[in-house]
Amino acid sequence: MLVSCVAGKGVWAMGPDPAPPAAAPPLVVLIGATGDEPLLGRIAAELRSLGIDIDQRLVSPEDHDLELLVETVLHEGARAAVRVQARVGRIEVSISDPATREVALREVLEGSPTAAAEPILAVRSVEFVRAMLLGTAGASAGTAPEGGLVGPPPSEHTPELAAASPVLGLTLASGVAAAAGGLGAQAEIGGEIRIGLGRLLGIDLLGLAPLTTEAVPGAAAANARASVWLAGGGLYAHRSAGRAGSVELGAGALAVGLRVAGNPGPMWSGTAKMRVGTAAYGRLGGALGLTRMLAARADLLVGSVFQRPVAYAGGPGYPWGHVFATALLGIEARWF
């Protein structure tokens, strides 16, 4: 407290305490390779908004001595080093001890290597750096917390990042379609289109063609064989499962085409006839990300045929069953 005296008047005046010297803002070094610049720039902008000084270091993707670089920048005075690897969805944050300048705490944030997951990685890494260097969210920028390093509360621990739902997915799939009653199971091949309507919902379109045919028992036409075609679509809900996995629940409608072909016979003058029915289905699907653009998919469709297609090959007709199931496996190409 400052006390001053005015000579001859006997008056004492009290002035304000002198302001303490402002603490220098902490320095954070961002380390990344060519191709990591978008994610580096996002993190740098967020940290600068908190009053944190930034130093960016671009390195070669083939550089294997980055651990030594992290230790070096910390010994040179940086309070934290953030190593970005956008291609594999990984950010490593190293926090130094203010006294020894050694690595005191290290946090690894990992997620799906997708453009949709990068903002989540950036926000989580910035939250961690802020909590370590600035303390609580209400602390002023550039003010270091008392008592050394401050960790985030348990509720702020970073969970595993969820797999993002693609805006567009194209799947090449194959599998088996079977119905209760009527014809036997048949191998199918086709494609699926998935269009995202947001983070949780989407539209799926499906088309399947037969790889095999089934003999029509008791047909009057010689060598009569039947095949099943499926086409339709519906809505689905998406939910993440771990870093790279996802599950989907959906429902929709299908057109079911039943085609019978063979040699002409009594009561059948043509060589091929086709009838179309309608069905509703429920779908359970799942995907596992393999790379940034590819995922393995599995889908199970179970439904009921409301209008059964009946194709004739002489004699009685041979419809597809009332209840059916289709199991599919495929590879999906994704765009985010």
Image (spheres, helix red, strand yellow):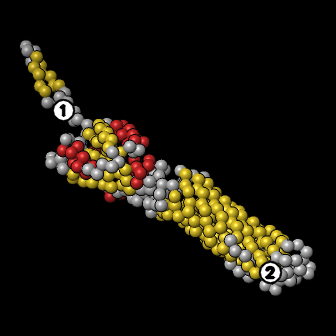
The residue that appears at 29% across and 38% down in the rendered structure is 55
Residue type at numbered disc 2: Asn
- Judging depth in this view, the residue of 98 and 244 nearest the camera is 244
Per the rendering, the mark at residue 61 is none
The residue that appears at 74% across and 73% down in the rendered structure is 227
The residue that appears at 48% across and 49% down in the rendered structure is 115
Q: Give the left or right position of residue 103, taking residue 178 as reference.
A: left
Tag 1 residue: 20
Viewer can see residue 311: yes
Residue lying at the far top in this picture: please name it.
8
Measured Cα–Cα span from mark 2 to mark 1: 98 Å
Tag 2 residue: 223
Question: Where 243 falls versus 61 (above or below)?
Answer: below
Image position, residue 59 (x, y; %): 32, 43
Camera-near label (2 vs 1) is 2
In what element is the residue under mark 1?
loop
Viewer can see residue 150: no
Q: Give the left or right position of residue 124, taking residue 188 as reference.
A: left
Question: Where 228 falls versus 51 (above or below)?
Answer: below
Q: Toward which corner of the image does residue 303 lie, by quadrant?
A: bottom right
Image position, residue 187 (x, y; %): 66, 73
Image position, residue 122 (x, y; %): 39, 47
For marks 2 and 1 on the same chain, the one whose residue lies earlier in the sequence: 1
